Image (cartoon, rainbow, N blue to C red):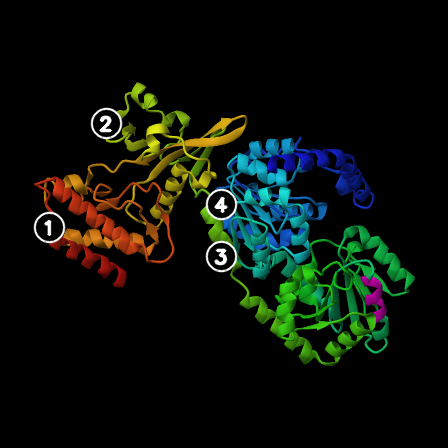
Amino acid sequence: MSLLSRFCYSLLLCLLSPLLLGYLLWRSRKDSAYRRRLAERFAFKLPAQHARSGIVLHTVSVGEFNAARPLIKQLLKQYPQLPLTITCTTPTASAAILKLQAEQQQGHNIIHCYLPFDFPWLMRRWLAFLQPQLLIILETELWPNLLANCKALAIPTLVVNARLSARSARGYRRLSCLVKPMLQNISQILTQDSASARRFATLAAPKVQLAGNLKYELDVPAQSVALAADIKPTLQGRIVWVAASTHAGEDEMLLQAYRQLRLQYPQLLLVLVPRHPERFDAVAALLQQQQLSYVRRSKSQLPDSTTAVWLADSMGELLSWYQLADFVFIGGSLIERGGHNPLEAMVFAKAVISGPYVFNFQQVFNLLQRQQAYLAVRTSDDIARAVQQLVDQPELAQQLGSKGLALYQQQQGALARTMGEVGQLLPLAGIARLQQGSAVAWFDAAFFPNAGLHYFQPQYWQQQGLVSGQSTGRNTVWFVRQDDKQAVLRHYYRGGLIGKINKDCFWPVPLRQSRAMAEYALLWQMQSWGLPVPRPCAALYQPRRLLGITWAYRADILIERIEGATDLAQLLQQQSLSAAQWQQLGSMIARFHQHSVYHSDLNCHNILLDKQGKFWLIDFDKCALRAGNDWQQATLARLLRSLQKERGLHNSFSWQPQLWSALLHGYQQQLTG
């Protein structure tokens, strides 16, 4: 059903493509940028080669891009070696991204292009070229073919700052046959608020988590602060009222309110900031028609003491206007547009005036309303009264602004939670990704700088004479070497009764959940914590397909061999351990538990002791990070049973039950010390 739904969607998209082109041409009448760079929108022109194997961040328009600024800054800081491709769909957002790209000292790490239209073959071509390690989508810009191709190419997808209104959720439910499989292709959704999380969960989105609103993490560019400082002397003696992101139908009401106030407050300056650049000339004509003295920012004109309105017909300068304001009106709220973002005004402690239509930012306005931290208006008379109140009572404006700033600060934390999820989904720094056909491999580039898929074939190592040994237990494990490095090559096999029928094929799962990649990622994470585990070298995910559908996968992993180490089961047949060593072992196990590492098969065969007297823990297949601590005693009990079992099998096994207390003593000492 999902394939049929997506086919119908793609067919409809093809049929409507002439209208799509017509829309771009129509928009280009007022903004020629809409007819430029069409080759990017159709994936004829692909990004630069150095954009490959990095992170893709999609921001629809300039609002989402501004919300993403702190996330962009953190991604560049935490993953400086990965190229960051920032995409959008509007020329205004494109201009803002290009400006950021020019400002970066390491600008080569930021690549920009338009996101192609959501035709399946365009998305496939674009994604297959870029092969990103992670796709991050701002808010709810969800496209079925984009997400389906990410799933097919094993690219994890993270939707951040997601919001879903009740109206949008109803629309999604009507298209559930298309929306449900689309949502199931997403690796993780991080929502702004709990209501959005509930609505996504109702739509059967498999992984939804409340993270908070990234717009509470506003990163004010230095250029914005500098511009405000440059303009400020011009506004000495003026009361500055900024009307931000206004729409047709609102400008008329705002100007009517201003006309009521100008005689009583001649020092009042209205800074009018239309939302869309194609309306700049129309608003200028409206000001001329109403015979209000005005200057235009686009013409570098400055207001004097008699100027009524400063038309801010420029892009990317709203944050500067907010810094200069005495109070702010939030546009899109006097008409059924749903209102624009008040947080950018709140961060500068500015008093907020807003109309009744605020459903786009309902949660924020609910918080403001509870604290009586903004002024609500409906008509031009209401607007005039609110402005009069703020002019006559500057202490009220200051009080409202302080309340808004306090609310803003209380809601922060979304960036840290988002970056935590990025760390879970993104192969960590230093990991090279290789894709050949449908097979995907990860490599530690420092360990294997020139690796290929042949590294997972025992025959390759045998032909090179690089096999140093093998373990022939239930399944063969190969010990291989390259230069001065030694590794263990292990193929994943099924166990139990099913393993006699199906030796090594596993049910298909997302790439990160596959046996090899999950073990590799966990080992890499534990390495970063300094836990005594072997270094992961490479992992392979090899899907099996029939008629283009993945029905199973096979997996392999290469792990660094711990030289001169012996497993505990074999060691205790040859010698005994001192009480201090048992305490050391207990302390080591406790360190793993302190990091919430659950080992599903903690037994004496998976504990090694090297020649330097250091204990190691190995074999993390089907292990994971697990919340809580109710499982920890069960893993200890499993180790105890394995020691008892080996003691029963071998007469010379040097372990006595009383030694278990020494291990527990070391364990408790680590937890409490």
Label 3 belongs to which residue? 416
Q: Quadrant of the C terminus?
A: bottom left
Describe the element under mark 1 as helix, strand or loop. loop
Q: How far is disc 4 from disc 3 in space, using C-alphas? A: 18 Å
**Residue 245 in the figure: left or right of residue 141:** right
Query: Which amino acid type is marked by label 4?
Result: Pro
Do residues under tags 2 and 1 come within 8 Å of each other at their CB atoms?
no
The residue that appears at 31% across and 23% down in the rendered structure is 461
Q: Position of residue 396 (x, y in %)?
A: 68, 79
Q: Position of residue 49 (x, y in %)?
A: 56, 32
**Tag 1: Cα neighbours inside 10 Å, few (<14), some, or many (≥20)?**
few
**Tag 4: Cα neighbours inside 10 Å, few (<14), some, or many (≥20)?**
few
Secondary structure mainly formed by the magenta segment: helix
**Residue 290 in the figure: left or right of residue 96:** right
Label 1 belongs to which residue? 656
Q: How far is disc 1 from disc 3 in space, using C-alphas? A: 48 Å
Describe the element under mark 4 as helix, strand or loop. loop
Label 4 belongs to which residue? 80
Label 2 belongs to which residue? 469
Query: Which amino acid type is marked by label 3?
Result: Ala
Residue 255 falls inside the magenta stretch: yes
Q: Position of residue 12 (x, y in %)?
A: 72, 36
Give the numbered dot on residue 296: none
Q: How far is disc 3 from disc 2 in space, using C-alphas? A: 46 Å
Do residues under tags 4 and 2 come within 8 Å of each other at their CB atoms?
no
Relative depth, front residue between 228 and 268:
268
Residue 638 falls inside the magenta stretch: no
- Tell me which label, 1 or 3, sits earlier in the chain: 3
